[in-house]
Image (cartoon, rainbow, N blue to C red):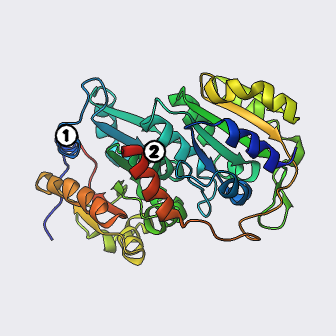
Amino acid sequence: MKPEDVLRIIADARGTAICIPTMTTSPAWRTLAPNDLSIACVGFMGGASTLGLGLALGCPSRRVIVFDGDGSLCMQLGSLPTIAGVAPRNLSHLLFKNNVYHTSGAQTTPGGEGVDWVMIAKGAGYRDAFAVSTLDQLRQRLPTILEGEGPIFVELHTGLSEKTPMTDRGGVPFPQQVETLRQRLSA
Amino acid sequence: MAMPESVPAPLIIDTFKDLFRAERGGGHRRHDPLGWIISVPDTHQKSVLAALDKERDLRVLTCSTEDEANGVAAGLWMTGEPVIVMIQHAGLYASVNTLRGIAMDGKVPVFYMIGLLSREADKDPRESKHSMVRYAEPLLDLFGVPHARLEGPDDVKRIPEYYRLSRERRGPAAVLVGLPTN
């Protein structure tokens, strides 16, 4: 699957969900969903999952969807049991698995293709975890991803994105995204 | 130098609750937590963490790492929730990039209670023989993080003071816990 196609399907169906892209999903997402219910994480090494956890706990009536990367999640692997331990019902954790650190030059991630993220998420205690390899499977699973009881973990088998935060810099600065999202959520 | 004293856990917890009540004003729903304590266990503050386990008005979330604690605190703050991060000095060192990225560059207020494990009662922390103790304040200074010492019960007023400072400045602020709480 192309990550852009995955994101397009999510963007069309997300409704009022807060979305948290990180690294290579960030450039495409800001084009597909240029609104103020997203916050892109770049620069703090795997922080999307826990930022999403905080948002999910503070907004229990709203779906929160994290677009994580396998390289990013390796950096904060402990976030899986942290999330599972508090078990927010409204959190969907999507892992874009491309087996490389794409942004920094496509170095292979630890374990690369052989890492079974579904097993890791289930072992950590996620309520549901499954893999998706085709866009048709993604469409079938979309109701679960958007409305199922979380925390839900989805391992998405994707290729490389067309753009990375290094090849396509820009977008709204992080502090401004923070302020806009906070204002929107407190309105 | 005045000798530091231990601070009782109930005094710290009451301070948290008063602070959170004041922040929420009249907007608190009875069954919701007054606020959140995001912690990575700290030996120095273990009596507070133990007392928090029995506390119904505050919700405690234990994270695997201090990086995570920063992320969770940031997300909660964006939703309008009052939140305090409790960590130890080693955790501060472990998470400086996240502190920089989220609290400093991201302009997200994060207030930390940082335990100075192994701090000698008869020495200024900057003169400690333990590097973990000695470098905590210089590191915070280097990053421009406002900080104060909790050196006895009279210093609990520093908690709301520096918590509010983090909100006013839209950035990090810290209180350093000098001796183990009791």
Say what amino acid the circle numbered 2 marks: Val
Residue under numbered circle 1 = B21
Q: Chain of mark 2?
A: B
Q: Quadrant of residue B2?
A: bottom left
Residue at 68%, 43% in the rendered image: A11
- In the image shown, does A119 or B148 lie closer to the viewer? A119
Residue B159 pos. (x, y %): 22, 54
Viewport quadrant of the C terminus of chain B: top left
Outermost left residue: B154
Say what amino acid the circle numbered 1 marks: Arg
Q: Quadrant of residue B122?
A: bottom left
- In the image shown, does A145 or B54 lie closer to the viewer? A145
| Residue B42 visible in the shown view | no
Mark 2 crowdedness (10 Å alpha carbons): few <14, some 14-19, many ≥20: many
Residue under numbered circle 2 = B40
Residue B111 pos. (x, y %): 34, 56
Outermost bottom residue: B142
Mark 1 crowdedness (10 Å alpha carbons): few <14, some 14-19, many ≥20: some
